Each structure stands twice: as C-alpha cells, then as structure tokens.
Image (cartoon, coloured by chain):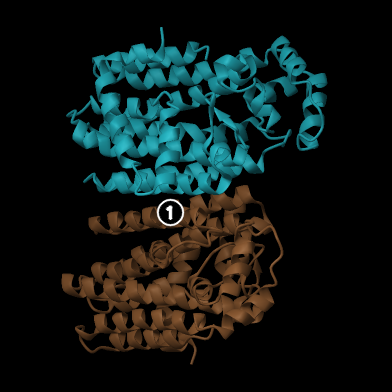
Chain colours: A brown, B cyan
Amino acid sequence: MRLTDIYWHLRSDITRIEKEIEKTIDAQHPILQEASSHLLKAGGKRIRPVFVLLSAQFGNYDLEKIKHVAVPLELIHMGSLVHDDVIDDAELRRGKKTIKSKWDNRVAMYTGDFIFAKAVETATYSNEPKLHRILSDAMVEMCIGEVEQIKYQYDSNQHFRVYLRRIKRKTALLIAVSCQLGAMVSGATEEHQRLLKNYGYNLGMAFQITDDILDFVGTEKELGKPAGSDLLQGNVTLPALYAMQQSQTLRQTIEAYLNKNGLNFIDMHGTIEKVKQTDAIANSKKVADLYIQKALQALEALPDTQAKHSLTQIAHYIGDRKF
Amino acid sequence: MRLTDIYWHLRSDITRIEKEIEKTIDAQHPILQEASSHLLKAGGKRIRPVFVLLSAQFGNYDLEKIKHVAVPLELIHMGSLVHDDVIDDAELRRGKKTIKSKWDNRVAMYTGDFIFAKAVETATYSNEPKLHRILSDAMVEMCIGEVEQIKYQYDSNQHFRVYLRRIKRKTALLIAVSCQLGAMVSGATEEHQRLLKNYGYNLGMAFQITDDILDFVGTEKELGKPAGSDLLQGNVTLPALYAMQQSQTLRQTIEAYLNKNGLNFIDMHGTIEKVKQTDAIANSKKVADLYIQKALQALEALPDTQAKHSLTQIAHYIGDRKF
C-alpha cells in the first residue's frame, strides 16, 4: 500500500489545495514564479495538507476555511526546503534540480523568503486570530531548529536529547500544528484540537526518525539522493548516535570524519554496512515505534470516523514505511 | 541639525521600542541571541519606528498598541539587512562586522528567517486584523524587490522605470506602511491613514534616491563603506543611469565593467569624479526633490500638530541630507 492510498478519498481536495498553492505563488515576478513552481512540480507527499484536511473532519469541514491553513503550512514547509538546500548545497531534491543549483543561492534565499511571506499572507485570510500566532510560533521554532542543526553539525558528542529536540523543532512541530489548526478552523472542540496536536507531534517525531533511518538503509533510487547523505553532511542522526554508542570502531570512524568537519575521506558504503551489523537501526526503529504508539494513543479518545481510521492507517504506514 | 534632533521629544518612546525589539529577539538560542543583538547594537536610524510613532500621534497615541507595529516593522527591516548582507557578501555594515562575516552565511540566513518570523509573531499581538495582511503584503513586495535587484544586477541597459520600481519595493513601501499602520493602530481616520501612507511612500523614494546619491558623493567615513560600492556590486542606481545617459565615455567605462559582471577592473575613484562632472548627481537630486515635494503635499491636509511639524522637518532633512 502507498501512503496516497490511505487518503485516496481526499485526492480531489488535495488537488484543490495544490491548485491554491500554485495560485498563491503565482508571483508577479517571472523568476520567483519559475523557481516556486519548479519547486511545486518537484512534488512531495503534501502530508501537512493531508493532516490539515483529516483533522478538519473532526469539525465542520469547509475547504474554503481549511485552505487558509493548509496552503500556509505547505508553503512554510516548501520555503524551509528551499533554504535547507542553500545550506546543504544540495544539487538534487527528490531527483530534481534544486532552486539553488538551477538558479543560484541568492535567488534560492529570496524565493524562500517570498514563499514564507506568501504563507503568512495567505493565513491572514482566516478569521481565526489565534491561528496567526500558532503559525508564527511554529516558524520561530523551525528557525531555532535550523540553527541548532548548524550548531551541532559535525558534533560527534551530542546527546540523544539534542537530536530529539532538533527534530521536534525541524519536523514534529509543523505536523502537530497542521493537525491542531485543521481542527481549529473547522471548529472542533478544544479537547479534540489538543488530541490531534498530540497525535501530530508524535507522528512527526516518528516520521523524522524513520526518515533518518532510511538515509542509512534506503537505496539511492528510493531516497533520490545517495544513502548516508546525512552523515556525509555532518548531520548526526539517531542511527549514527546508536552506532557510535555500540561500536568503538564505528565511533572512531565516524568521529575521525566529523572532527575533520567532513574534510577527510569516509568509506560511507562500508560504514553503512557496519552500522547495519549493530543494533543501531533496530534501536532507532524502537524509538520511532514508541512515538507511533503515543500517536495512536492520542487518537483513542477521538470519535470513530473515517478520518480517525485514516490517521490510524498513516501512523501504521509511517511505522512500517520502507521509503 | 541631526535627524535625531527632529524627533528628540520621542527619544524615550524610541528607547522603549528598542527595548521591546531586544526583548523580542532575546532568542531561546544563544547563537540567534548573539547574532540578533549584535545586529541590534549596530544601531541604525530606526526611522521606521519613528514614522510609526509620529503617524500614531494623529490618533489616540497608545505605545502599548503602537509597539505591536513599530517592533515588527523594524524587525522586517533588520531581517532584510541580514539577508542583504548574505547576498552582498558584505563584511561591514555601518562600520560593524556583519553577521555573515562574524558567523557564516548559513547562520545569517536563518537569523534573517528568525527575525522575520519574530516580526510576524509580534504583529499577532495587535487586534487589528487588516494589519497582518498589510504587513505580509509589504514583505512579499520586498522579496520581489530583492529578486528584481538580482535580475537587474550588472544590467547596464535597465530603464529608469525599473530602478524606481525596485526602490519602491525595497524601501518606499515599508516606510509607507510604517506611516499607514502607525495611524491605523491609533485609530486615525481612513483619510489621515491614506495621506500618511502617501507621505511615507514619497519620502521613502526620496530617502533611497538620496542614499544612492550619497554612495557616489559620500566619503568612506560617512558611508561606513567605500564610495561607489553600489556600482562595484553591479547595482545600477539613478546617478549611474543619468551618467551613462549623458556621457558616452562613462557609458563605455561602466558598461565595460558591468558587462563583465564586475570581473574586470574599474577605476572607481576616477569614475566617481567623472560622474560628478556630469549633471547626473544634480538630476538625481531633482528627482529626489520631486518626491520630497509630493511628501510635503501629502502632509498639507493634515491638522497642524507637533507630529506634522516633525514629519515636515524630516522631509526637509532627507532633501538636504549629506550622509
């Protein structure tokens, strides 16, 4: 089963949201226009809009209201991808050229700024005043997460706690907010908003951990980038932390690479193989599963609806996802 | 007379706004904290808050309401400076090291993002719903202006119209919005809001043109950067456009430099001297004066108050400003 099969019944609404996104970034300026729609065409799972739509079904589902949150949330995600690519010097994303490689870093930076500003602008069309603060708070936390990532890049001695705090800010919060705001704009009860936010947070954590696992076990074809990219770029993720904890040899190999800020050679293929021989992947998987369980618990108190069923299936899917 | 003398009576309120800005960017994160306050300490004229405060005096002046606009507007300006420095590869701003030279481009980009997000967050504390849209629209236009600047960098054949549209987006709109929103949050009449916005727009245009003139006629000490920096970076401003229009020799010199994307030598000192021998500076000054006149006209219909007097003085000051 593919992720999209789970929310197949939402496909027409998702298409409408994508059309709205397209309309929103239909810039008054050719370069921004081209850069943004290039990014849009690169696709993506659109999981944030999906969570908004599904959470909105716990209230009065009105796409005209929902789009004022679904569009900004996907735009904030898109803007952060553009700025990440500037930072990562990424040439490819999902197999497609990144904006910074197709144009340059300067265009990429301002395209990101433009997309962020458009996200905020779109949100202003919602009459929910609390919404703006929740959205901007999430953006603030995301920025802090990005700087955290820079601070701890090539740092082989970071604590597991530091990693978890980073992925919370970089990934989990925005998914939590997607669920929370979807419920809020549709007038779901405070309690349902809280539960859905809780679900989103735990699912987001599991989602990122799984992503970080796949960077070790996935194939280049599946990932759209070489396996081990995170480590190569000095991003120390959960599997690497477990591997270093378990194997002295791996600690030495990885530290030797990180402490030289990635300037010396690392046999990534060999390293990945060694990591797989440890329990690093299994242990990381356990942590992901723990978050999946918490996400499922959050759903329990919610009414049994098609939406709840889909959110449950997504949680299971993330838990088992292979790519 | 210095600019600050004109709004001397506002000094305590401006200090309070600066304290608020400090509090706002008092990040949960050391690097952002340091980077932001480094930027804050670099100072600046704070003209955007000044325009907010002065315009607010045409309604019920309440600093508690005003700060929710004054702070975001200065933050948006600060954030754009940080991102400009990434683009310009500037090592110094106002004689102080820039964030990107003190840290690196990545930190600079995310510090800018963080400051923008904080600006939006602060604005959410205002109960004026229209305010958010006006603010985000201004941010959108600013981004388009930035990309326009990249598009026309090293372009010797750009029309005067292109230059004016660019400085409108990059500078004038944010000052127009400062006046408009200052009046709005204090409950000034729609008509007064319109007039003050109009004043701000024209004053902003004059302000930027004067800035671009000073880049040719100012000293390194006055500018805090070498004279001719704009042209050296391929930014074709009004004096350069007039000079190329008037002198074939200058057109050849400047084109030779621009068409090589600034990669070949230009005797900037000699070029500046030649520009001064043309009417380029005088003609640019005429355009600036035209905008000053329009700004003063906008003030005419406003009640004769201390605030109107200050805005008038500021317009005259910008018209005569030497640095």
- Residue A96 vs B50, above or below: the answer is below
Tell me residue B310's x, y (percent). 32, 15
Toward which corner of the image does residue B212 lie, by quadrant?
top right
Residue at 45 percent across and 34 percent down: it is B39
The residue positioned farthest toward the top in the image shown? B1
Estimate how packed mark 1 is, as few (under 14), some (14 to 19) or many (20 or more) residues with alpha carbons within 10 Å: many
Q: Is residue B286 visible?
A: no
The residue positioned farthest toward the bottom in the image shown? A1
- Residue B11 vs A312, above or below: the answer is above
Side (left or right) of B127 relative to B225: left
Tell me residue A278's x, y (percent). 54, 83
Tell me residue A319's x, y (percent). 42, 85
Residue at 46 percent across and 16 percent down: it is B318
Toward which corner of the image does residue A187 lie, by quadrant?
bottom left
Toward which corner of the image does residue A57 lie, by quadrant?
bottom left
Q: What is the secondary structure assignment of the residue under circle 1?
A: helix
In this figure, what is the number of numbered marks?
Answer: 1
Tell me residue B141's x, y (percent). 48, 44
Quarter of the rendering occupied by the N terminus of chain B: top left
Label 1: which residue?
A: A143
